[in-house]
Amino acid sequence: MRLYFRLIVSFLILVFLGNPGMAAPAQQKSYKIGYILTLDSQLGAGAKTFADEVAKRTGGRIHIEQEPDSALGGEMEMLKGIQQGTVDIAFITGAPLPNILPEAGVFNVPFIFRDTAHAYAVLDGPIGKSYLDKFKEKDMVALAWGENGWRQITNSKRPLKGPEDLKGLKLRLPQSDVMLTGFKALGAEVASLPFPQLYGALQSGQFDGQENPIATILSAKFSQVQKYLTISGHVYDPAVVVVSKDVWGEISEADKAIFLEAAKAGAKASRAFAAEAQKNGVEALKKQGMEVIDQVDRAKFVAALQGVMPDYAKKFGPEVMAAIQNTK
């Protein structure tokens, strides 16, 4: 019996050695996706859905590891890493994109979007698709437009009801020249600062205020260092899933299609999370002690920006701005 068992084992070893591909499991590929917010955020929801969809559609053959909380650096660092091939995948908010793709700054123009439906129509239509294609010229592959959210203003000094209340307020903005131009026109004292440094800068008084979507204000716990929240909705901030050309070049055509569909699913998840936070987050922030100003004179803000609108039109092209504004 023992001899028979040994013969069987020897036979199986010979078969395996002669045909290693028959018994060897498929090698799992692993990539990292980075983003600046927590796992429990709009970006985290999108990145996790993307990872789950990739795993499901590849039968676990491709694993996407989460790197939240700026573990791979700030957004500009991640974008440069994508270009250099040192970062695999990132979910980047819209504000810093003009530093890499200047044309994308048009989405940062204050009040260019009427509402969420308008923003979706632009980003999911021919205009949005054409901007995703432009990333190829910058050594990265953009897969889908997700969402960071409608940006709202917080500060520690006073209630903000109109543009006149911004005068002299020290406001941190993301690394976006377009937004800096807009808030300077509104009279604020503005400067850029990478997001990972923002909480400490607010806590120390380096800045009086900042602006971000409700979901970000919640996840970053800004209510601990900010008293007033103004529902201004001055900028709709998209987010984009970008992949390094190195990663894109090494996966098969079938896997590229899977990444694309997974990114679209992740984009929808980020939008759903941001919408839920916008709906319920304001009440949560009230309970955390913030004073909420939800009635602002939008027309006064728009009027105060008219002096810089010709600059925006010159920068991005009046026909581009008109095409966005006229999208139904």
Image: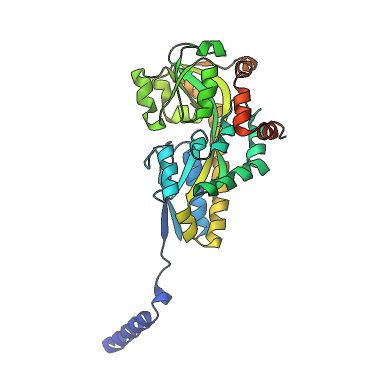
Between 256 and 279, the residue placed more toward the observer is 256
Identify the residue at image location x=59%, y=31%: 315
Between 75 and 160, the residue placed more toward the observer is 75
Report the quarter where the N terminus lies: bottom left
Colour mode?
rainbow
Between 272 and 125, the residue placed more toward the observer is 125
Report the quarter where the C terminus lies: top right
Task: State whether residue 305 is above or below residue 112.
Answer: above
Residue 259 place in picture, x, y as percent? 53, 53
Furthest-left residue in this view: 2
Task: State whether residue 228 is above or below residue 199.
Answer: above
Residue 221 seen anywhere in this rendered image of the structure: yes
Identify the residue at image location x=51%, y=46%: 138
Residue 142 place in picture, x, y as percent? 54, 47
Number of marks: 0
Identify the residue at image location x=63%, y=39%: 123
Q: Give the quarter of the image for residue 325.
A: top right
Residue 62 place in picture, x, y as percent? 45, 58
Residue 283 seen anywhere in this rendered image of the structure: no
